[in-house]
Image: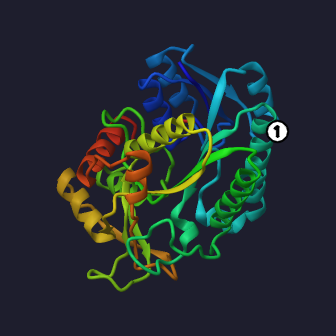
């Protein structure tokens, strides 16, 4: 049984990935400072798989918890790094906090991993590094833009750091550039607890179930219905990509990769709203936010050919199944996990 360190294990994607890796026979050493993660997600997984299969440490990756954890668990063979702040709007207000946590935290994490001989890492990145699409679908050779947001800048800075360390042979990594994440576990047991969520599909389902109002916050773009088209990837499929990335790293002594994770298809905002209304049977009101995003890209759709070729990864969930899992999750947990 191989042991994996997971930072940000109590968060939305982190907890779903823990669930999948535990189901596949891994042992998890989990770190989360619970500033954005939830102890209930950790406790649910410990009850499901056993506290000996998921060992949890509360602490901040900027403050030495990683070294202490690695000292206690020399059996750790690789790391999946989720611990990061990811609210784009918030990053404009407190960019220094995003730099300290996302870049400074990643720097310290990597230093401590390397010092303890753990040289294989899967990094949680984002398609935001591409900027507006110059062509579609977006593959990994697409030009990298100067990120517009402070959040995007932190992801790009971390990717540059990883690439430099890989060139010096200090570590091996796979950076997974996610497109738009949606859904919950198939049984609806683990999902997104952010209130409000940053994710369109989640917010539409929350509105349909009467949990929170729904508002459009985009500027009109050049698409058939005037709303942005995005690539919505299910969170369980995303977790599966992390498991396949860890497996690839453990099977290869050399080499690092940057890989897009998306479905290769797109849906507009209005198509998402229509789908949620159809599946819930609720014709919820759609408001308009007073502060609408500007400079919105018309379309952002991933090429997932590299993910298929390198990792053997293929998405298996439909938009409808993602919505259905969210209906189950929010019916059980209208406000998500409570703090």
Query: Residue extending furthest bottom?
Result: 222
Residue 335 shows up from this direction: no
Asked if 257 appears above or below 286 in the picture, the reply is: above
Across and down, in percent, residue 84 comes to 65, 49
Which of the 4 image quadrants contains residue 139? bottom left
Residue at image coords 70%, 29%: 58
Across and down, in percent, residue 319 comes to 27, 54
Which of the 4 image quadrants contains residue 278? bottom left
**142 displayed left or right of 309:** right
Asked if 105 appears above or below 4 in the picture, the reply is: below
Residue at image coords 69%, 38%: 119
Residue at image coords 29%, 50%: 323
Front residue of 7/38: it is 7
**76 displayed left or right of 61:** left
Question: Residue under circle 1?
Answer: 63
Residue 146 shows up from this direction: yes
Front residue of 291/67: it is 67
Residue at image coords 58%, 30%: 39
Which of the 4 image quadrants contains residue 82? top right
Q: Please rate how many residues cluster around mark 1, counting C-alpha atoms within 10 Å: few if below 14, some from 14 to 19, many from 20.
A: few
**112 displayed left or right of 128:** right
Across and down, in percent, residue 23 comes to 41, 25
């Amino acid at each position: 049984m191989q042991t994996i360190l997971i930072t940000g294990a109590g968060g939305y994607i982190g907890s779903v990935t823990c669930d999948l890796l535990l189901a596949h026979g891994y042992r998890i050493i989990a770190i989360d400072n619970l500033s954005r993660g939830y102890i209930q997600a950790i406790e649910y997984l410990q009850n499901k798989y056993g506290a000996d299969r998921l060992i949890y440490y509360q602490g901040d990756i900027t403050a030495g918890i990683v070294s202490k954890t690695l000292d206690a668990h020399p059996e750790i063979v690789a790391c999946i790094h989720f611990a990061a702040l990811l609210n784009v709007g918030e990053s404009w207000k407190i960019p220094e906090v995003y730099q300290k946590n996302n870049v400074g935290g990643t720097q310290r994490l990597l230093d401590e991993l390397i010092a303890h001989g753990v040289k294989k890492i899967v990094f949680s990145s984002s398609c935001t590094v591409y900027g507006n699409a110059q062509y579609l679908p977006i593959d990994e050779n697409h030009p990298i833009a100067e990120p517009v947001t402070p959040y995007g800048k932190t992801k790009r800075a971390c990717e540059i750091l990883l690439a430099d360390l890989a060139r010096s042979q200090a570590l091996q990594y796979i950076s997974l550039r996610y497109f738009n994440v949606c859904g919950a576990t198939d049984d609806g047991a683990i999902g997104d607890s952010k209130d409000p969520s940053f994710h369109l599909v989640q917010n539409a389902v929350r509105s349909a179930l009467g949990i929170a109002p729904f508002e459009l916050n985009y500027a009109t773009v050049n698409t058939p219905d005037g709303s942005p088209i995005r690539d919505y990837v299910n969170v369980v499929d995303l977790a599966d990509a992390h498991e396949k990335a860890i497996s690839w790293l453990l099977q290869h002594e050399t080499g690092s990769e940057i890989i897009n994770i998306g479905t290769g298809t797109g849906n507009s905002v209005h198509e998402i709203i229509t789908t949620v209304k159809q599946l819930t049977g609720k014709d919820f009101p759609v408001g308009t936010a007073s502060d609408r995003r500007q400079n919105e890209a018309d379309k952002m759709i991933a090429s997932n050919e590299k993910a298929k070729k390198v990792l053997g990864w293929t998405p298996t969930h439909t938009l409808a199944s993602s919505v259905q899992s969210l209906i189950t999750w929010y019916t059980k947990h209208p406000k998500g996990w409570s703090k």
